[in-house]
Amino acid sequence: MFELHVLGTSSARFAHGRSVSGSYVMTPSGALLVDCGEGMQNRLVTHNISLKKSDLNIRSKMAKIRTILFTHAHLDHCWGLLPMLQTMGLDGRTEPLNIIAPSSKEAIEWATENPGLAPDLDSGVDSSDFAILFHQWKNLGGKDGDFGFPINWVLVPINQKSPFPSPVQPFDGVVLHIIPTNHGIPSCGWLISNVPSHGKFDRAKADELNLSNDQIRELANGSDIKTSSGQLLASDFRGKVPEPRSILISGDTTGDVEAFSQLPTSPDILVHEATHLMAYEGKAKMWNHSTSLDASRHANISKSKVLALTHYSSRIDDIKLVQEEAQELHKCSIACIDGDIFTVSKDGEVSMHRRAEGWKKYDF
Ligand SMILES: [Zn+2]
């Protein structure tokens, strides 16, 4: 159903072999990125080479990316975008690409009136808002932002604290929700869910009625059929519509965000920052970040199954400590390493393959 590749687990800068933020998600109808820190394109390529040498039938191809989602505009989350777009152009890409990012109403209005300029300090608009950055990147990308393929640049003002559906939904059968977070600038998490259409076909029930193979096939395909004893409705041969499967990638945030308790569906995996250990709780609060315990609290109120921890401060060398702290509140927590791949089956089974351990498999 979903494959999630965690390709950067460091906050702010490269440290201890950990790169800055960026995740690749394969959905049933195409791939997306959530965040795109410095060097993301190189990471995708080396990760894919490693996958090709493995027994796994999983890949992380840049050409498959249909949409890039951002959690916020700090450079450790977005500085890899421009070179990646230029590479996509050089690779001869023709398919359109969506780029969807949180912003503010004020910044969008200011940037519309002053395209390409950077706001003064007294303008009240943050110069690192995506509304400003999009114009600058388009200018750097070439005439009128022409990278050689169509790009749909989408700014979403974050005016509310509750989750809401993304105004652009690029994937058939997959719905994107924006989860407003708290990081001092417009910020959000991305909930990626499938839309289950129908329950499982009850073959045993059909078999009991002595139907022909053709009749059973029709019922299984959703068509009602007529028999000598009357009409049979295909819907009567379907089990309950299953729960949607979902992944929430939260971005940077403090640990007290109500929206995590208001999700439309409970995530199978919550990818959450744990910039600091509990000993540095004060620093986490000061910089609008989370501790490992904050992450596990959000995992609990969102009823997430697996908590995947990431975005560690360079101060943290041994990430097992992050995991142990989070497990005090949320047992099913794992501290991610760059290159970890999680899979979610349609029945909600979550597994992980760890590149750093020769693709060793973990089940949750
Ligand atoms: Zn960050």
Image (cartoon, grey):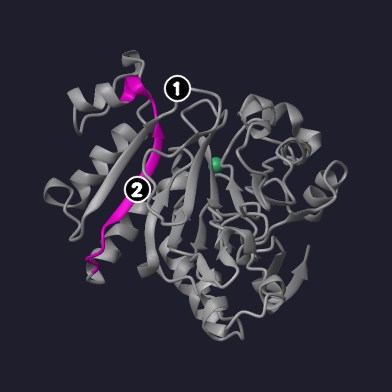
SS at mark 1?
loop
Q: Nearer the viewer, residue 87 or 226?
A: 226
Q: In what quadrant of the picture does the N terminus appear?
A: bottom right
> Which quarter of the frame holds ligand 1?
top right
Query: Which residue bears the numbered disc 1?
Result: 159
**Looking at the image, which residue is at 44% across and 44% down?**
70
Q: In what quadrant of the picture does the C terminus appear?
A: bottom right
Query: Which residue bears the numbered disc 2?
Result: 99
Query: In the image, is the residue at mark 2 within 8 Å of ligand 1 by its beta carbon?
Result: no
Q: Position of residue 264 (x, y in %)?
A: 60, 38
Outermost residue to the front = 228
Specify whether 142 is left or right of 124: left
Specify whether 342 is left or right of 192: right
Compared with 48, 74 (above or below) is: above
| Crowding at mark 2 (Cα within 10 Å: few <14, some 14-19, many 20+) | some
Give how far apart the Cα atoms at labels 2 and 1 are.
19 Å
Q: Which residues are magenta?
A: 93-107
Compared with 221, 155 (above or below) is: above
Q: Nearer the viewer, residue 8 or 172?
A: 172
SS at mark 2?
strand
**Looking at the image, which residue is at 22% across and 71% down?**
92
- Is residue 205 found inside the magenta-colored segment of the image? no
